[in-house]
Amino acid sequence: MTTPTSAGELLWLVRTGQATTRKALRARSGLSRTTLTARLDRLQAAGLLVEGGQEDSTGGRPAHRLRFDDQHAVVLAASVDTMHAEAALTDLAGRRLDHRAGALRVADGPEPVLGRIAEWFETMLAEVGRPVCGVGISVPGPVEPGRGRVTQPPIMPGWDGYPIDAFLGARFGAPVLVDNDANLMALGEYRARYPDTAALVVVKASTGIGAGLVIGGEVYRGVDGGAGDIGHVRLPGHPDARCLCGSLGCLAAVAGGGALAARLTELGLPTTSGSGVRERILAGEPAAVRLAEAAGRQVGEVLATLVCVVNPGVLVIAGDLAEPHFVAGVREVLYQRALPRSTQNLRVEIGGRGEALGGAVAMVVEAEFAPAAVDRRLEARP
């Protein structure tokens, strides 16, 4: 970041804890006392900054502490999965104020699913008297960066190009940001548990398989949002495994929860999705356990290459298949195939169902309170 001069840059320093007193801000910015005071006054008048309390003094008058007002607005966040969705209302620090969840089939199309989520949002908002800062949505499909819609999603029929941002933005009068669920799981895990990790990879193994990458504190999305789409890496020896994308032998078609559900059904154990596979594994069904271990090894083959390329400090396995049998299979092959140098400092963790909601909140807050966004907001004020 360059030497800060604008009000938005000053707020960023306060919000990130780099400077929390007027003295510290003057030292970081080089601004005169008068200019600094004028810009802080604008932030306080906009409800973005509060001043109070005192820092410990080593001599002289104690300094009043500045802090970002994380209570002045709320964030609406939702995570859409293949058979389930959840929604939360949080403050700007990500603390949950309310939560809803229920069965929703993404295959039913955008309007039924988004309509139900909007109803949840409206019910939660009725209990608070604060404005909506923004809406963050996690979806199980590829999303073009900077656009509130998915592009050619294999497991989301009817969603291709649908204007999610316009649908929800019209109802809540706030910016709507959309991203792939693996990306937001990665961002959520990074913010909540691994903020000091230089490179983090989260693999979502559910009905489909995908990965999210956080490098240097930022989600890496690639040129058009395709980074981490490991579910469509083709495995040799599986010419009959037809993927929903139309190709043969994709990792998702071989080792994803949907593929495992189909095999269990063929074995006389009717199963419809990755969550159903998880239920059978947790119940100790031997066939489900064997399939999970084998699928983990197949995913490990692909992750060995990814780990050699990215060299992450933490690899989190999340989603419906994130349980010990599946992860044991991943570990077995990953540590065999990857270079020892790439794994000697690697932690492989189980992330459960993931942190997509937390990532959605972080995505909104980071976008809406970036220095340039704050400056635009202040300029628009009368």
Image (spheres, rainbow, N blue to C red):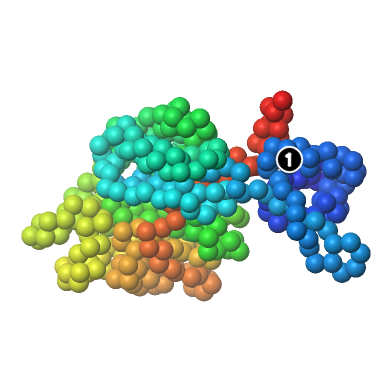
Query: Who's the residue at 84% across and 42% down the image?
Result: 37
Q: Which residue is mark 1?
A: 43
Relative to 164, is 219 above or below? Answer: below
- In this orientation, which residue lies closer to the viewer: 67 or 186? 67
Q: Which of the 4 image quarters holds residue 198?
A: bottom right
Can you tell which quarter of the image residue 153 is in?
A: top left
Residue at left offset 71%, top offset 46%: 49
Seen in the image, is 180 located left or right of residue 28?
A: left
How far across and how far down the image is residue 57, in percent?
84, 67
Residue 155 in view of the camera: yes
Horizontally, is 309 left or right of 208 in the view? right
Q: Which element type, helix, strand or loop, lies under badge 1?
A: helix
Residue 124, relative to residue 162: is it above or below?
Answer: below
Residue 151 location (% of width, % of height): 39, 35
Residue 145 visible in the picture:
no
List x then y, in percent, for residue 36: 84, 43
